[in-house]
Amino acid sequence: MQKELVEKLQRACPQAWSDLGADPAVSNMAFGVVIGVGWHELLLNLSVMIQIELNSHPEPRFKFTAVKEKFGLLNITHKGSTNDSIYEMIDAAQDESVIVCEYCSSREEVQIRDLGGEILQTMCEWCWAECQLPLP
Ligand SMILES: [Zn+2]
């Protein structure tokens, strides 16, 4: 995901994203946000909602520990929260990723596609068709 999009996420909820760029020995967030831009809005909305929750119920140790794609879906791991609302928000964002194209954010004709080699991606019909074109 491009730097400026990642910076928007960090501005929306600095605490959640505080491990971005950390030492790889310390956090998987060292490798950045390794997902398609289609899920940026999902993550931005999630970050905004978490920040609102943290404003009223601070949890100083909460942060994301990995944000990635797993089995074709958005996968977020985190630590430091005992707040059920935050757990529910994260679960909802992960569940929503199944209907949002990871590449273009379309919500039409979206399914989990099997790219072969055990690679699964949530993609709309159009992005899937692009994927199927023979290499030039
Ligand atoms: Zn798409």
Image: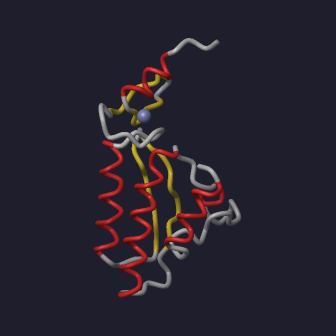
Q: Residue 33, relative to residue 20: is it above or below? A: above
- The residue depicted at 56 percent of the width and 12 percent of the height is 134
| Residue 123 location (% of width, % of height) | 40, 33
The residue lying toward the viewer, choosing from 5 and 91, is: 5
**Residue at left 38%, top 79%?**
52
Q: What is the count of numbered marks?
A: 0
21 horizontally vs 99: left or right: right
Q: How is the image coloured?
A: secondary structure
Query: In what quadrant does ligand 1 lie?
Result: top left
Q: Quadrant of residue 26?
A: bottom right
Seen in the picture, residue 44 relative to 61 is either above or below; the reply is above
- Rendered position, 90 above or below 107: below
Image x and y of residue 112, in percent: 35, 33
User: Would residue 132 be found to the left or right of residue 84 on screen?
Assistant: right
- The answer to which of 96 and 125 lies nearer the viewer is 125
> What is the x, y in percent for residue 28?
60, 58
Query: Up-down: is 106 above or below 3?
Result: above
Residue at 45% over, 39% down: 104
* Residue found at the far right of this picture: 23
Instruction: Locate residue 24: give its quadrant.
Output: bottom right
Indicate the quadrant containing the C terminus: top left, top right, bottom left or bottom right.
Answer: top right
- Left of 10 or right of it: where is 75? left
Q: Nearer the viewer, residue 65 or 99?
A: 99
Q: Residue at x 29, y 74 (%)?
A: 85
